[in-house]
Image (cartoon, rainbow, N blue to C red):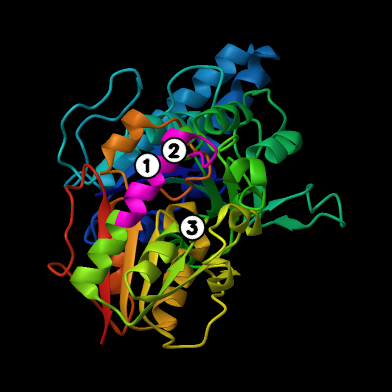
Amino acid sequence: METVILSVGGSLIVSKDGIDTHFLSALNLFIRKHIKSGRRFFIVVGGGQTARTYRNAGKDVIGELTHEDLDWIGIHATRLNAHLIRTIFQDIAHPRIIENYDKRLIVWSESVVIGAGWKPGWSTDYDAVILARDYHGSMIINLTNIDWVYTADPAKDKSAFPIKKTTWTEFEKLVGTTWLPGTHAPFDPVASQLAKKIGVSVIIANGKNFKNLDKILRGEAFKGTLISPVDVDNAFYDKEYFVGKKSGYKVACYESFFGKMIQIFAHLYRALLIRFLINPKNCLDVGCGIGQLVYFLRKLGIEAYGIDVSEDAFTFAHKDIIPYLKNGNISKIPFPQNSFDLVTTFDVLEHIERPQLKKAVSETVRVSRKWILHKIYTHENKWITYLHTKDFSDISILSQSFWYNLFRTLDNISIIRKSWLRLPSFIETVFLLRKK
C-alpha cells in the first residue's frame, strides 16, 4: 500500500469560531475514498486555536511562560485534537494514538494511524517527518490554510509572490533553523532540517481544497509548494551528478570499471528481453543516459532511438549511436504521436516530481503506437536500499499500487501482466502497458 503522511494544521480543526465540522466531514470522506485505492494514511494533528487559547490564558494569569511550558500546552492540545480525529475514524484507525514516536508499530492492519505531539522543541511537522522516515512514507502533505508558501508575508509585503517549488537549502533561508512555541512558519524549521537530512519531500497545500488534494495523490499538477532535497531539473544537467560524484549511486558511475560492467550487462539483458519477448520494429528509450540500451537494440536489429535531459550523457556514448540520441525531456517528448512500437523508461519515473508524474507517463503513451514499458524503483525493491547509498534525486519513491492506480487512469491503456519476464518485487518493478 502507498503510505501517505498528512500533517494537519490545528487551525483547520479548531479556529476562533470553534471546531470546523465541515472540514472534518470533508476529511472523513477524502480519507475513506482514497483507502479504497490502496493507500493508508498517517494523520498527525496540530494544536490550533485550542493551544493558543490555553497559552494565552496562562500568560494572562502569570505573565511569561517558559518555552517548555508553552510547548507542553501545545502538545496536550494536539492530543485532544488527535482523539477527536481518532473518534471519526474509529472503525478504520489503529486503536493507539502515537504520542511516543520511539515506540514503533510493528504489525498493524488498519488503514489509518493517528499521531499527536511528542516532545518539547519541535512541532507535529517534525513528528510527520519521523513517520515518513520510519514507515517509508511516499510523501508528506502539510495541510494548512494557505494555497502556497510565499517569499514573504503577503499581508505585509506587496512584492511577495508564491513559491511553487524549492529545495530545503533555499527554504531554510526563509524559515531559519530555530523552533519557538507558536511559530507560524509554513513548516517547522527543525522538521525542515530532518527532512533535508533524510531526503524526503514535502508538499504544502490548502487543506480545505480537497479537489486539489486529489490531484496531489494522483500525480497531477496541483496548487501548492513542493519542497525537495534537490532541484532535479538542474541536477540532471550537472555533469558531476550524472557520472556519480554527487548522486550517491557510486556503483553506477560510468567512470569506474565495475560500474561500466554492471551497466553493460543490465542493458544487454534488457535488450535481449525486448527483442525476444516484444520484438518491436522500432523503439524509443526515454532517459537513455549514454545510450547503451539503444546500442544493443540496434545490434539486435531494432530501429532504436534515445532521449535524455543531460547532453553531457552523450559525451560517454558510443560514436556509432550518437546520431540516434536526442536531447529531450519526458514531460515533452520531441516526437510525434504514435511514432514507436515500443517506448521504454528504465529507472526514470522515480526522478520526476510528483505534479509531473501523470503528464510524464501520458507523454510516453502519446508517442507509442503499441507498447509502453516502465521499470520503476519502488518501495518494494529492497535490494537498492541495502546496496546503494541514498540518491536525493529519487523524489518519487512510491509503491507498486500507486503506479498501478496511475496507469489505470489512462483511458486507452491496458496493463499486461504476463508478457514480460519479471523478477521478484524485491529486485525490480516493471509495468508493461499496451495501447488499446
Labels 2 and 3: the sequence-earlier one: 2
Q: In the visual, does 429 lie left or right of 291?
A: left
Report x, y in % for residue 137.
37, 41
Label 1 Cα crowd, 10 Å radius (few <14 / some 14-19 / many 20+): some
- Taking 423 as reference, is 339 above or below it? below
Secondary structure beneath label 1: helix
- Residue at 18% in and 50% down: 423
Report x, y in % for residue 338.
41, 88
- Considering every residue shown, the one lying at the far left of the view is 418
Please tell me which residue lies in front, 390 or 357.
390
Q: In the visual, does 47 lie left or right of 436?
A: right
Which mark identifies residue 259?
2
- For the residues labelled 2 and 1, the Cα–Cα distance comes to 5 Å
- For the residues labelled 1 and 3, the Cα–Cα distance comes to 29 Å
- Taking 70 as reference, is 305 above or below it? below
Q: Give the position of the C terminus as an image quadrant.
A: bottom left
Report x, y in % for residue 320.
53, 66
- For the residues labelled 2 and 3, the Cα–Cα distance comes to 29 Å
Which mark identifies residue 354?
3
The residue under label 1 is 262
Query: Which residues fall within the magenta stretch?
Result: 253-268
Q: In the visual, does 210 lie left or right of 245?
A: left
Can I make out residue 109 in this image? yes
Can I make out residue 211 in this image? no
* Identity, as a three-letter code, of the amino acid under mark 2: Gly
Please tell me which residue lies in front, 316 or 349.
316
Q: In the visual, does 138 lie left or right of 14?
A: left
- Residue at 54% in and 70% down: 331
Secondary structure beneath label 3: helix
